[in-house]
Amino acid sequence: MTSDNGLYLVPAAATLTGFAEHSRTGLALASVPEGTSIVVRTLHSRYELTVLDGAASEVLVCGGQRFSTPTAARLLGSSAGGTAVRLGWIGFGLKMEIAVGRDTTVTSPVKSIAIARRKSNRPMSCECDR
């Protein structure tokens, strides 16, 4: 987008300074114990992530339009939708990047994060968006 004087207008989160500001508040997956359930609400969806290996960013994910059944995935991290990604991080106001094989899903911006330990060993129901 250009302004009247021909300068390009760039959203704050797309600049290095803006990305640094947006990536301050959130959750480092490596700090979450195995088996912990994380519910992430984005602008358009709800996701449930069960941590399989936080240090390796391995999760079981359900929710959104792409994950109607529990799916083994890797949380790459969070971004503003560009090339800069904070690895292993779920950041408020940023988009999660979730990889399954060679396919990467980029969510809408994160609005809330809730952590809860699973109460049983029951399989994940995956009724996140229903």
Image (cartoon, helix red, strand yellow):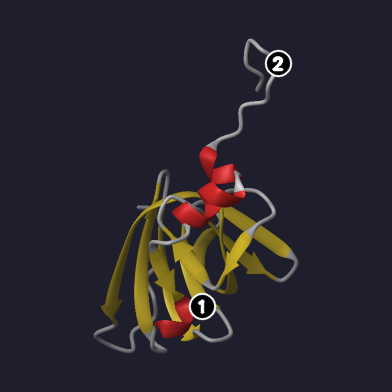
Within 10 Å of disc 1 (Cα), the crowding (few <14, some 14-19, many 20+) is many
Query: Badge 2: how crowded within 10 Å, few (<14), some, or many (20+)?
Result: few
How many numbered discs sit on the rendered protein? Answer: 2
Q: Nearer the viewer, residue 85 or 109?
A: 85
SS for callout 1: strand
Where is residue 3 drawn, in percent x and y? 62, 16
Residue at screen point 42% across, 50% down: 45
Q: Is residue 63 left or right of residue 6?
A: left
The single residue placed furthest to the right in the displayed view is: 102
> In the rendering, which numbered label is found on residue 106?
none
Cα distance, mark 2 to mark 1? 45 Å
CB atoms at circles 2 and 1 under 8 Å apart? no
Q: In x, y percent, where is residue 106?
A: 59, 53
Instruction: Relative to 119, say whether 104 is above or below.
Output: above
Tag 2 residue: 6
Numbered disc in front, either 2 or 1: 2
Which residue is under mark 1?
59
Quarter of the figure with residue 2: top right
Quadrant of the frame with the N terminus: top right
129 and 80: which is toward the camera: 80
Residue 41, picture quadrant: bottom left
Q: Nearer the viewer, residue 10 or 52?
A: 10
Q: Is residue 125 left or right of residue 59?
A: left
| In the depicted structure, whether residue 73 falls above or below residue 110 | below
Task: Residue type at mark 2: give it.
Answer: Gly
Instruction: Tell me if I can see residue 128 in this picture.
Output: no
Residue in the image at 49% along x and 84% along y: 54
Please provide percent x and percent y for residue 6: 71, 16
Callout 1, which amino acid? Val
Q: Judge left or right: residue 102 versus residue 11.
A: right
